[in-house]
Each structure stands twice: as C-alpha cells, then as structure tokens.
Amino acid sequence: MTDLLHQAISEVQKLPSDQQNAIATRILADLKDDQSWTKRFEATTDEQWDRLAELAKGEISAGETVPLDDVFPVDPSQK
C-alpha cells in the first residue's frame, strides 16, 4: 500500500461508520467502472478504432465540433 493511500485510509477511519461506508461505496463503484472501461478498451478492435477516427474526422470537417481551447481556455500565463 502506498503512503498516500495509507494516509487516506487513516483519515477515513476517523469518520463515523456511515461516512466510511459512503466513501467505501464510492471507491468500489469507481474501481468497478475503471475495470469496465479497461475491458471495453481492450476489446476494441483496430477496425473499430479506425472507424471512430473516421467519424471524428468527418465531424471536424463538417464543422460539428468545438475547439478544445473554446471549451477549456488556456491561461495565457501557462503558454
């Protein structure tokens, strides 16, 4: 176990049981979701990735997308 995870568990142990259970439920759901996505990505074929790329290129060419900088502006001081 990493030091950070040990620290987090130590802090959670200080909470009342209902809060500990709520945090545990969120962590377990997150882990299950991550495992599900991992399986889906691993099962994706090269042909499926190629098709997805073609769809994205088509949407970009058709002007159906928004530039990321418009959605997530970059702080000028970070450039």
Image (cartoon, grey):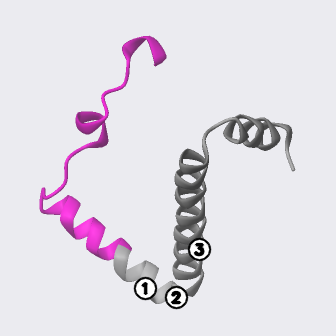
Using the numbered discs, state the Cα–Cα distance from disc 3 to disc 2 in whole angstroms. 13 Å
At horizontal 12% and vertical 56% (from top left) the residue drawn is: 63
Q: Which residue is mark 2?
A: 45
Give the camera-side residue of 19 and 79: 19
Give the camera-side residue of 52 and 6: 6
Residue 56 placement, left or right of 45: left
Q: Which residue is mark 3?
A: 38
Q: Amino acid at mark 2?
A: Thr
Q: Nearer the viewer, mark 3 or mark 2?
A: 3
Picture layout, residue 26 above or below residue 29: above
At horizontal 38% and vertical 18% (from top left) the residue drawn is: 75
Q: Using the rendered view, name the quadrant where residue 74 is placed.
A: top left
Using the numbered discs, state the Cα–Cα distance from disc 1 to disc 3 in whole angstroms. 16 Å
Dot placed on the residue nearer the N-terminal end, 1 or 3: 3
Is-magenta flag for residue 67?
yes
Q: Using the rendered view, name the quadrant where residue 5 is placed.
A: top right
Residue 56: x percent and y percent? Answer: 29, 67
Using the numbered discs, state the Cα–Cα distance from disc 1 to disc 2 in whole angstroms. 5 Å
Q: Amino acid at mark 1?
A: Gln
* Region rendered in magenta: 53-79
Q: Nearer the viewer, mark 1 or mark 3?
A: 3
Residue contact at pointers 1 and 2, CB within 8 angstroms = yes
Residue 20: x percent and y percent? Answer: 61, 48
Give the structural element (helix, strand or loop) at label 3: helix
